[in-house]
Amino acid sequence: MERSGIKGSLFAAVVDDLNQLIATGAVGVTEVEAQLDAKELELLDAKINTAGWYDIHTYHRMVGILCSAEGGDSREYWLERGRRAARRMADSGIYQQFDYLGRTKASAAHDAESRFRAFGKDVRLLLSLQAAVLSFGEWKTVVDPDHDDRYRVEIRGIRGIPDGIFLAATGTFNEMSALASPQRPHRWEYERAEPDLAFIRMTDPA
């Protein structure tokens, strides 16, 4: 396993997207060669093992090429990347966490306090998805010290990991929330507090 890796199921998607842009001429081969090393370039022609692990920095560089080619705000691009990844994972049927979205504990609770406690359990379960697709970081759900009616996810042990990776995770959280509660999905925002610590904060009351 890569020390800082991403699951092949997500890595395969960025390889496919990049190859499509190369094939259509939307991004030049020279540009790709300037940003990827020889081993990374070989991955564009390789069969990606969806159950394997791939270097997170290679993934980040490939997504950076896509972002530059497709334009737009880089922060929003990473968020959308995460939303799309969540939809692909839900459609794949591989990740059991998505089967749980339609029957969350919070949806069965009747009063506000019970819903809040139950939602915390839901978030902790859904955090297990990150462990399934990222091989680094310690993810923990806590009550937001600034808002006692909200949660935040604390991510430690991430020094050197680019912000884009966690913006994508935030996009995944937002999409999962929308799948779990279409009428009133919880919204999440990303903040890098320190080089080795980041937060994904819930912005709406539970």
Image (tube, rainbow, N blue to C red):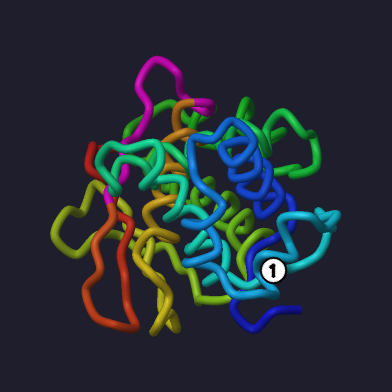
The C terminus - image quarter: top left
Q: Nearer the viewer, residue 161 or 17?
A: 17
Where residue 154 sits in the image (x, y, percent)?
37, 68
Magenta highlight on residue 175? no
Please identify the residue farthest to the front as the structure is shown: 30
Where residue 96 sits in the image (x, y, percent)?
75, 42
* Helix, strand or loop under label 1: strand
Residue drawn at (49%, 62%) of the image: 60
On screen, residue 96 versus residue 15, left or right, reads right
Residue drawn at (47%, 42%) of the image: 81
Q: Which residue is mark 1?
A: 54
Please identify the residue farthest to the left as the structure is shown: 146
Kind of residue at badge 1: Tyr
Q: Nearer the viewer, residue 194 or 14?
A: 14
Look at the picture and state if 109 lies above or below 81: above
- The magenta stretch is 179-189
Magenta highlight on residue 181? yes
Residue 56 image-quadrant placement: bottom right
On screen, residue 138 versus residue 166, left or right, reads right
The N terminus - image quarter: bottom right
Where residue 55 sits in the image (x, y, percent)?
63, 73
Residue 6 image-quadrant placement: bottom right
Where residue 109 sits in the image (x, y, percent)?
48, 31
Residue drawn at (82%, 58%) of the image: 46
